[in-house]
Image: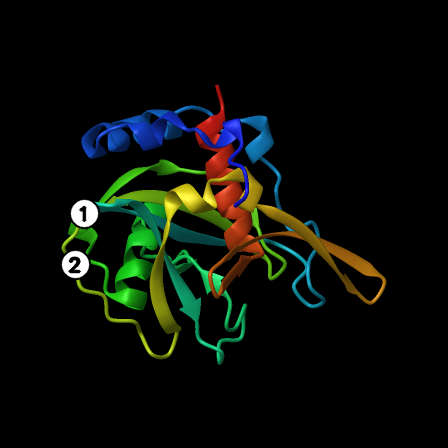
Amino acid sequence: MSRVSSRSKLPLFGLPPLHQRDWLAERLARPAPASAIGLSDGFRLPGREGRDTPAAVLVPLVNRPEGITLLLTQRSAGLPDHPGQISFPGGRIDPGDATPMAAALREAQEEVALPPERVTVLGNLATYQTVTGYSVTPVVGWVEPPFSLVPDPVEVDDVFEVPLSFVLEPAHQQRHFRMLGTLRRDYYAIPYADRYIWGATAAMIVILDRTLRDD
């Protein structure tokens, strides 16, 4: 059994649920710490250079009796961008979306039928630029059960939850790299059971972690 570092002891996990929500909202209302800014992929894939496409994702924190969980999706293998990867519900911001929050809630409803009325938005994280040219605003939402999810078969192969305490444990946040020809790509990965959370999703979890730990 791996030793849990002292850094993992966030006050969040010692609070009752109602206070957890308030604590999260207070932390997210603060300016983003320097350690959570600029964690982009660092380059663009060929053909994706140029202006960023605004996008938003919902980071859904589910209030379960056994502890807060993080809701994630497994993207369809047939999608043109990030096929088969684990991600947050979300997508590009449409002209009809008044805010990134509106886009994130709309996308979550379209992708997995998460009812917006079950979500209390707590705040936003620092934006993240992907290799595919998206500037993503992560919108953190507190989700109250009960709710029933129905994945959109075109976009989502699976939807599942992982313990928030697991992904916010620094020892589980790994740093790796891949060589794309002569180009080195560094990325985060957070393996969980038979799931492999990596790339933009893992980086946004790290952004959440650093934001909550900032004093």
Do callouts 2 and 1 mark residues in contact (Cβ within 8 Å)?
yes
Q: Residue at x 37, y 79 (%)?
A: 154
Picture coordinates of residue 83 (x, y %)? 52, 73
The number of discs equals 2
The quadrant in which residue 164 appears is top left
For residue 38, side relative to residue 153 (left or right): right
Q: Which mark is residue 192?
A: none
**Closer-to-camera residue (13/91):** 13
- Looking at this view, name the residue that lies furthest to the top: 215
**Mark 1 nearby-residue class (10 Å; few <14, some 14–19, many ≥20):** some
The scheme the figure's colours follow is rainbow
The quadrant in which residue 115 appears is bottom left
Q: Residue at x 33, y 60 (%)?
A: 107
**Closer-to-camera residue (10/120):** 10
Q: 22 above or below 189? A: above
Kind of residue sitting beneath label 1:
Glu
Secondary structure found at label 2: loop
Kind of residue sitting beneath label 2:
Phe
Picture coordinates of residue 170 (x, y %)? 54, 38
Q: Residue at x 37, y 25 (%)?
A: 11
Where does label 1 land, which residue?
144
Picture coordinates of residue 88 (x, y %)? 41, 57
Residue 200 appearing in the image: yes
- Looking at this view, name the residue that lies furthest to the right: 182
Q: Which mark is residue 147?
A: 2
**Mark 2 nearby-residue class (10 Å; few <14, some 14–19, many ≥20):** few
